[in-house]
Image: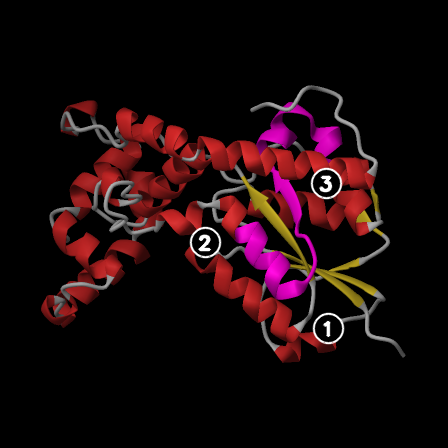
Amino acid sequence: MSAPETFFHIGYARAASTFLQKTVFPALTGLQYIPRNNFRVRESEKRRFRGDKILMSREAGEFIFDRVDRVHEIFGSRIIISLRRHDVLAASTYRLYAKNGHTFRFDKFLDLETNNGVRKVEDFTYMRLFEHVEKVTGQKPIVLIFEDYIADPDFYIDTLCSALQCGVDKAKLSHRAVHKSYSDKQLRLRRQFAEKALSPEDDHARLIGTGIEDYTFVKRMKEKVMVRVSGIMMRLIRFAPDSWLNDEPLLIDSHVQAIREYFADDWKAAYAYVERQSEELGVSRNKPAPF
């Protein structure tokens, strides 16, 4: 029996990966989709293969380049990448860090000047990732841009189905958001409360790998507690009075704009990549590209 054809979705965190995993992928027909529940990128997962065409998915965040290497080594899969505009992705990912009890500020998340942020500029450079996938796998990645789904969902779904040569049960598709966003108030208060146990400086130093020798057991436990109580904290904070908020915004608008401008050429190149992809697949847009 010949080995099955495999596809592996490796999405940036906060780039509609969960939406794909819970809403889109289960609605596809003509292939076996292995849900992400209890799934790990390892050889033993092959025992779950039942068909001749397999789809798997695990978002990777800052480990996306390593995930490409590992997936190719074990499965030899065609890679699917989901992404969204750089500034939106950066802001959404930072909000996740704040929700989990981190206290470093947004300009320390993606530092455009010194590249000493929690996340690195090169990890946000989409064309670098596409080139890496092509070099490692010898195939072009299948690229899905979330802004395309918002503007033209039929084009988005048709692109995926044409690339995978599969069908879709549209009755199973839901356009509801999978994750409801937390409010600005909740996240600001979450960061304020977390700062009582974890300073922004210590938090940033720990995440970029400096100051480890000063990161004591007590500090590590405080950080773990901050993450573990996130769910209940976010629920309780909803009822806190606005008077508890200080004047500091969650995001820095000027830095959001700076990220958008810094990656503008990369964003245009990513869309050009998708345009060439759609031509090769014979898929047409119903609306102009939204960039």
**Of the image marks 3 and 2, the number of the one nearer the N terminus:** 2
N-term mark: 1 or 2: 1
Which image quarter is the C terminus in? Answer: top right
At x 57% / y 47%, what residue is drawn?
17
Task: Give the magenta range.
Answer: 129-157
Q: Tag 2, which secondary structure?
A: helix
Of the pair 256 and 261, the residue shown nearer to us? 261
Q: Amino acid at mark 1?
A: Arg
Which comes before the other along the chain, label 3 or label 1?
1
**What separation in Å lies between label 1 and label 2 (alpha carbons)?**
25 Å
* Label 2 sits on residue: 61
Residue 193's x, y, as percent? Answer: 17, 43
Residue name at image x 49 percent, y 37 percent: 266
Q: For residue 63, which quarter of the picture?
A: bottom left
Q: Provide the residue designation for mark 3.
A: 277
In this view, the residue farthest toward the right is: 1
